[in-house]
Image (spheres, rainbow, N blue to C red):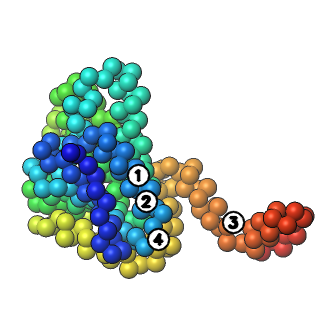
Amino acid sequence: MSAVHLIRHGAVAELRLDNPDKLNALSMAMLDSLVAHCDAIERDEAIRAVVLSAAPARAFCAGADIAEWGDYTPRDFARHWVRAGHRAFDRLARLARPTVAAIHTHAFGGGLELAAACDARVLAPRATLALPESGLGIVPGWSGTQRLLRLMGEPAVKEMALFGRRIPAQRALALGFAAEIADDAGAAAFAMAEKAAGLSPRAVEIAKTMIHAAADEDRAAAIEALGSAAAGGTEDRAEGVAAFTDKRPAEFSGR
């Protein structure tokens, strides 16, 4: 049965795609599990970093499971399938913890879009990237023309989406999409995550929020999160809550 597993390795959590019989293709149940696991990670202060991995197969993730969406009407395809993918990928992208994808082999379509939702990516030398949707009569629908374009640039995304070309690991590194290439992508990704786990978690969270705001990754929410955090640490906030609880007028000090 297809699944996404949450595995804890001390301060590092692993999100592992497990659908090897279908090249780790994503099902609706897997998308829902990804959201639930991200919520659990967000609530667990002991988790400092996250690695996205996949069960051994000929692909890291071959994209969306065609058996899941092939019979959808155009309206339901857009309303349910596309939105479910965005909900899951956006949830991963906006985790407060730093995330690293370990891409041991090919990442196609939704699998590539999923990797793009992470903060960094480690590729094995034989890994390739592709957006094969046009060969199925559809288009990238889970941020391949949006978030992925910001990471790789317009020419590379056009090559994949319009011309059906694959991008090898070395070129992904040159484009800045990959942080590094390693024979053991999983071990290298865990090394990055463990390094992040040793840094100040609050500083890392704030830095990630600031970078996302600059990159227009949910800018409105990022700005409000930073502002709320600043206001939440003031004496005025404590006084406001105390006054509300005591049913008295607040006496704000401006501190």
Mark before the other along the chain sequence, 1 or 3: 1
Please state the horizontal and vertical placement of residue 17, each as a whole percent of the image.
Answer: 24, 52
Q: Secondary structure at mark 3?
A: helix
Give the image quarter of residue 31: top left
Q: Is residue 20 above or below residue 227?
A: above
Distance (Cα) linking label 1 and label 3: 29 Å
Question: In the drawing, what numbered circle is on residue 45?
Answer: 4
Please state the horizontal and vertical placement of residue 248, each as a whole percent of the image.
Answer: 90, 65
Mark before the other along the chain sequence, 2 or 3: 2
- Judging by the rendered image, the residue that carries numbered circle 1 is 36
Front one among 226 and 65: 65
Distance (Cα) linking label 3 and label 4: 21 Å
Q: Residue at x 17, y 55 (%)?
A: 55
Residue 2 visible, this orientation: yes
Name the amino acid type tagged 3: Ala
- Judging by the rendered image, the residue that carries numbered circle 3 is 231
- Judging by the rendered image, the residue that carries numbered circle 2 is 40
Distance (Cα) linking label 1 and label 4: 16 Å
Distance (Cα) linking label 1 and label 2: 6 Å
Q: Is residue 91 above or below residue 183?
A: above
**Which-is-in-front pick, marks 3 and 4?**
4
